[in-house]
């Protein structure tokens, strides 16, 4: 699967003096961060540190009030549509259509970027969603199956940067293990992963680097 993320290209994320406002509050307050392609970055820090805002900025969902940023080679101020095309974000809601089947969810998102039937089948197979599960409406899936479906959408969309806000939340131990294997496979296939998780010990084993935030800036970077 091509994630448009060859090692040696420009950084997956490059932010300089990034300021982002949430209701006039600087959730990011002059943040500097560079993320190389293929890394798995664990974002840590207390509630309100800016982790979710950082993910939303990288997804092209929250604009910068000041500073500069490039995500997957595109300027996040002038190229937000291109950023959104190359980036995928999974948060608590998973972003799925409950009334559609697993296959229909993947076909809907795949159609937006011209993915063919083979890519849809490959994504379902990669996430263990082929066979009977492909025809099950999302409302009938377990929490783990929903999360796998959300990740399959990132695959079929060929997202080069995976932005994950609490990807282990609501999952049992087996499903958390599945998430970890999926993320390691995605990174080894060329994707870059940035995640925020309260499962600190689990995420630390998974990550290639830990970035700690406080007050909307980076206060620790385990490069």
Image: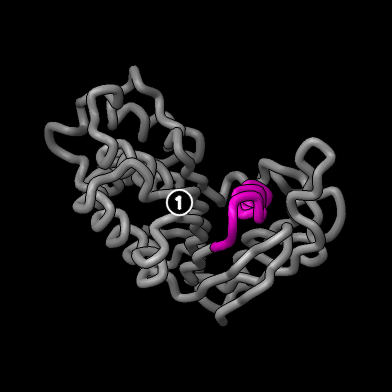
Q: Is residue 146 left or right of residue 131?
A: right
- Quarter in which the N terminus is drawn: bottom left
Q: Nearer the viewer, residue 192 or 141?
A: 141
The answer to whether residue 59 shows anywhere in this view is no
Q: Position of residue 111 (x, y in %)?
A: 45, 33
Q: Position of residue 95 (x, y in %)?
A: 46, 33
Q: Is residue 215 above or below residue 119?
A: below
Q: Magenta stretch: give its range.
A: 44-59
2 in magenta: no
Q: Is residue 48 left or right of residue 151?
A: right
Q: Position of residue 206 (x, y in %)?
A: 37, 69
Q: Nearer the viewer, residue 47 or 151?
A: 47
* Residue 66 placement: quadrant: bottom right
Q: How many circles with numbers are drawn on the protein? A: 1
Q: Nearer the viewer, residue 76 or 176?
A: 176
Residue under the point 81% across and 54% down: 19
Residue under the point 52% across and 57% down: 161
Residue under the point 55% across and 50% down: 87
- Outermost residue on the right side: it is 66
Q: Secondary structure at mark 1?
A: loop
Q: How is the image coloured?
A: one colour
Residue under the point 51% across and 67% down: 41
Q: Is residue 78 above or below residue 10?
A: above
* Residue 45 placement: quadrant: bottom right
Q: Is residue 183 above or below residue 48?
A: below
The answer to whether residue 53 shows anywhere in this view is yes
Which residue was labeled with disc 1?
Answer: 158
Q: Is residue 92 left or right of residue 73?
A: left
Q: Position of residue 106 (x, y in %)?
A: 36, 35
55 in magenta: yes
- Outermost residue on the top side: it is 99
């Amino acid at each position: 699967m091509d994630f448009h993320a060859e090692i040696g290209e420009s950084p997956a994320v490059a932010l300089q003096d990034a300021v982002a406002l949430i209701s006039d509050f600087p959730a990011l307050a002059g943040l500097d961060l560079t993320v190389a392609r293929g890394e798995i970055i664990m974002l840590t820090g207390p509630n309100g540190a800016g982790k979710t805002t950082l993910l939303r900025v990288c997804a092209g969902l929250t604009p910068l009030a000041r500073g500069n940023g490039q995500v997957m080679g595109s300027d996040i101020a002038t190229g937000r549509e291109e950023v959104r095309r190359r980036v995928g974000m999974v948060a608590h809601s998973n972003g799925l259509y409950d009334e559609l089947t697993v296959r229909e969810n993947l076909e809907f998102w795949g159609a937006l970027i011209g993915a063919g039937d083979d890519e849809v089948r490959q994504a379902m197979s990669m996430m263990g969603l082929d066979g009977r599960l492909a025809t099950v409406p999302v409302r009938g899936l377990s929490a783990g199956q929903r999360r796998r479906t959300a990740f399959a959408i990132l695959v079929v969309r060929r997202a080069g940067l995976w932005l994950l806000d609490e990807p282990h939340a609501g999952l049992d131990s087996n499903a958390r293990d599945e998430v970890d294997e999926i993320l390691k496979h995605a990174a080894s296939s060329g994707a870059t992963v940035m995640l925020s998780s309260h499962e600190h010990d689990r995420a630390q084993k998974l990550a290639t680097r830990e970035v700690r935030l406080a007050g909307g800036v980076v206060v620790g970077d385990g490069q």
